Image (tube, helix red, strand yellow):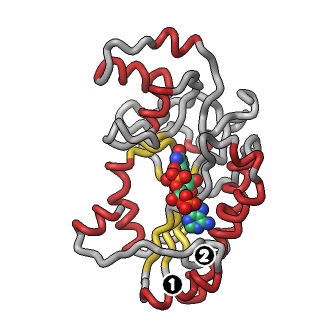
Amino acid sequence: MGDILEKRGLKWEYAVCRMEDRENVLACLKSSGATHVICAAGVTGRPNVDWCEDNQVATIRSNVIGVLTLADCCELLNVHLLNFATGCIFHYDEDHPLNVERDPNTLVARDLDKTFMEVEKANFRGSFYSRTKGYCEDMLRSYRCVCTLRLRMPIDSDLSNPRNFIHKIANYNKIVNIPNSMTVLDELLPFAVELSLRKRLGIYNFCNPGAISHNQVMELYKMYIDPEKNLEQLQRRGTSESHCRTEKQQ
Ligand SMILES: NC(=O)c1ccc[n+]([C@@H]2O[C@H](COP(=O)([O-])OP(=O)(O)OC[C@H]3O[C@@H](n4cnc5c(N)ncnc54)[C@H](OP(=O)(O)O)[C@@H]3O)[C@@H](O)[C@H]2O)c1
């Protein structure tokens, strides 16, 4: 984000406060004179999302109290808040089936009602992380200064970045083979800057069109990156190590 802002000649700086520290957030906003805040802070859990199950208060402190405090301070000072949130608050159900028919050119679903639209509220409560995120997203709907971006599996062009979804699944012991939405950061982050500058509000499914299964990603990985990758072994190993598990997989 910093690189994009720099290239566009925009003045920016990192915040130096914790989001839940209201006094410091207010002081930071006032002293910087910020007109826009871009927030990519949150607890995701290390080494993985399971950390949040055992550290629920710390997860609430950042993902709920922190983000709501930040939004509240921005609202008071009339500052626009662009919040990098998550689409890991949904799971497939009867009304939103796994495979929907899509236009082959645009990948847009033929029946949009069968996909998760921006108006829908979280329906996945299978991980504590997702519960905090779903709750917070819903509360943020009440604020008039907030733009919420629902990101999904983040992909960037740096394959050595351990936070890159492609790196993660190429190196995980197990992968989940269900179609997921993806967020290709190199492609979409410039739009995030634009949404911030234009002070857009509300919720956006901040994903690339369509959905792709982890096995399909690994097949592309084998084709373009590592022809030696042993996919059979990876796929046989099983089901569970994902950022956002479904209840069934748990
Ligand atoms: N990674 C994914 O797969 C994924 C997918 C969809 C959406 N997202 C969302 O995107 C956002 C960023 O994810 P990420 O993968 O970049 O996370 P990350 O690598 O875990 O980084 C999160 C950052 O937030 C900071 N932070 C946490 N709590 C804070 C607080 N209370 N006040 C100030 N800073 C705080 C952390 O700093 P400290 O280490 O100092 O605490 C860290 O620098 C999160 O909201 C996440 O839910 C992530």
The answer to whether 166 appears left or right of 94 in the picture is left
Cβ of mark 1 under 8 A from ligand 1: no
Q: Tag 1: residue type?
A: Cys
Ligand 1, what quadrant?
bottom right
For the residues marked 2 and 1, what is the alpha-carbon distance in whole angstroms? 14 Å
Q: Nearer the viewer, residue 48 or 89?
A: 48
Q: Tag 2: residue type?
A: Ala
Image quadrant holding the N terminus, namely bottom left
Mark 2 Cα shell of 10 Å, populated few (<14), some (14-19), many (≥20): many
Mark 1 Cα shell of 10 Å, populated few (<14), some (14-19), many (≥20): some
- Residue picked out by circle 1: 28
The correct choice, above or below, for 147 with respect to 242 in the image is below
One can see residue 205 in this view: no
Q: Residue 169 placed where, x, y %?
A: 49, 29
Q: Residue 73 placed where, x, y %?
A: 60, 83
- Residue picked out by circle 2: 71
Helix or strand or loop: what does disc 2 sit on?
Answer: helix
The correct choice, above or below, for 111 with respect to 248 in the image is below
Residue at (52% x, 68% y) in the render: 147
The correct choice, above or below, for 50 with respect to 69 in the image is above
One can see residue 140 in this view: yes
Q: Residue 54 placed where, x, y %?
A: 77, 46
The image shows a total of numbered marks equal to 2
